[in-house]
Amino acid sequence: MRLNHLGLPVRDAERSVRFYAAYFGFDPATAQVYDDGTVIVRDAAGFDLALHTVDEVEPSPAFLHFGFRWPAPDGVRALLVHLEAGGVEILERYDEPAYVAVKVLDPDGHRVEAYWEPPG
C-alpha cells in the first residue's frame, strides 16, 4: 500500500494545474472536473492531486508540507533553477552530500518540497 492521493484547497484550480504541471510533472491532459468543481490531475506515476476551489485558503502551520522525491540530486538542482526562473518563492534550500532539497510555496501558499536522499 502507498499514498497516491492528496486533496488541496485552491483559489484557482486551472492556475494550480499549470503550477504542478510546470514544476512537478503533473499532466494537464489527465485533469478531470467533477460535479462539485474538484479537479483531479495525475502525474506519470499515478499520483492524484484533488484540487478543490474555495474562496479563501487558510494558512497552514509552518511545519505542514508534502514532498516529491527525486531519483538523483541533479534533478532537484535543475528544478531549483527552473523554480527561480519562474519567480516561485523559495522557502528553504539544502545541498549536502546526503540531502538535496528545496521547499517552495505553491500559488495558494501550500509548502511543497522536492528532495533527494540516498536509498536506505
Image (tube, rainbow, N blue to C red):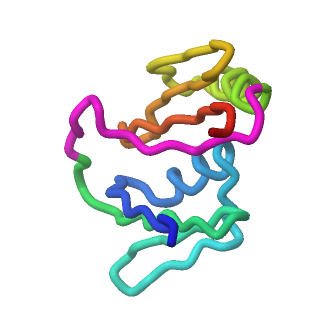
Q: In which quarter of the image is the C terminus?
A: top right
The vertical placement of 114 against 74, above or below, is below
Q: Does the magenta stretch include residue 99?
A: no
The location of residue 101, given as percent across then percent down, is 58, 25
| Residue at 52% from the left image edge and 51% from the top image edge | 15
Query: Relative to residue 52, is residue 49 drawn left or right?
Result: right
Left or right of residue 117, residue 35 in this image:
left
Q: Residue at x 56, y 25 (%)?
A: 102
Q: Which residue lies furthest to the front in this view?
A: 120
In the rendered structure, the answer to whether residue 100 lies left or right of residue 35 reads right
Q: Which secondary structure class fits the magenta region best?
A: loop
Residue 92: x, y in percent? 47, 18
Q: At 47% across and 38% down in the image, what residue appears?
A: 112
In the displayed structure, would residue 4 be above or below residue 15?
below
Question: In the picture, residue 8 is in which quadrant?
Answer: bottom left
Instruction: Name the residue located 36 percent from the left edge and 65 percent from the top edge.
Output: 52
Which stretch did the figure color magenta?
58-73
Q: Does the magenta stretch include residue 64?
A: yes
Name the foreground residue: 18 vs 119.
Answer: 119
Classify 94 as above or below 4: above
Q: Is 79 placed above or below 93 here?
A: below
